[in-house]
Amino acid sequence: MCGRFSLTTEIHKLQEQFFLENTEDLDFQLSYNVAPGQQVLAVVMGQHGNKAGFLHWGLVPSWAKDKKIGYKMINARAETLHEKVSFKRLLERRRCLIPADGFFEWKMVEGVKKPIRFVMQDHQPFAFAGLWDRWNHEGEELVSCTVITTRPNELVKDVHDRMPVILKREHQQKWIDQEEHDLSYLSSMLTPFDANLMAAYEVSDIVNSPKNNDLRCIAPI
């Protein structure tokens, strides 16, 4: 599961890393504690570069009758994407990058859940593999997304039995390539990220509440 992450990287750095063409149009703000139900930055392929926009975190499929289903679809399991009709269609046609620079999981220590933040060793931003869809119902429209998860790597497994799919740099552009429909190739990207390139540290339990969104959420303790 991936239920909380951070994106505290300045927009000009994200523009450079993800080849964004429309950063001047974005009302972008740093977030130290991104939670389900919020708007998250997502990247898709555009005509002259990649385009970034904000999507509701919690996938509401186009066929859903009630948008509340999104609360149950913040994540999608990589191992079963091709087995579910709704996810298979999105895997073929509606893939996105979800930039982040850390994510949180909770470790049980003597009966107390301790929040742990996972980052890159070089503290650079990275991209989750995401899927998106557009929902229209009785005049209301919602564009939403989900974060794909996979089995944990050696660093994460001591804390949780799932981790978000972090795409390798060389896979990021192919993931959002609108001409790429090879499900076997796409699925081959959905593997645990190299633990040797990551680091983890404990943070304050202030991060437990999504109402808290400041530097204290990512500060080591």
Image (cartoon, rainbow, N blue to C red):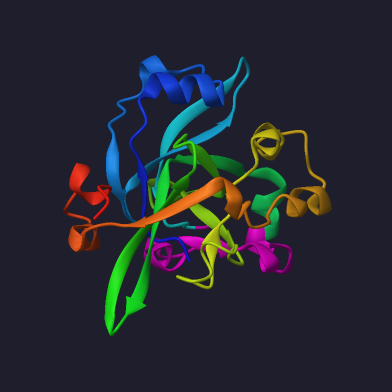
**Which residue is depicted at the point 35% across and 25% down?**
10
As displayed, is residue 20 above or below residue 156?
above
Which residue occupies 30% across, 26% down? 27
- The single residue placed furthest to the bottom in the displayed view is 111
Residue 192 image offset from top left, x and y in percent: 64, 57
User: Is residue 218 left or right of 130 when viewed as pictured?
Assistant: left
Q: Is residue 120 above or below residue 45?
A: below
Residue 161: x, y in percent? 53, 73
Residue at image coords 31%, 28%? 28
Left or right placement of residue 104 versus residue 177 in this view: left
Position above or below: 55 against 87: above
Q: Is residue 133 visible?
A: no
Q: Position of residue 125 (x, y in %)?
A: 47, 36
Decide which of 165, 180 is in the foreground and name it.
Answer: 165
Please give the count of numbered marks on the rendered protein: 0
Magenta region includes residue 46: no
Quarter of the figure with residue 97: top right
In the image, is 220 to the left or to the right of 132? left
Which residue occupies the foreground of this view, 163 or 57?
Answer: 163
Q: Nearer the viewer, residue 35 or 51?
A: 35
Residue 185 screen position, x and y as percent: 81, 48
| Quarter occupied by the C terminus | bottom left
Magenta residue span: 61-87
Q: Residue at x 37, y 15 (%)?
A: 24
Position of residue 29 relative to residue 132, above or below, is: above
Q: Do we see residue 175 in this rendering?
A: yes
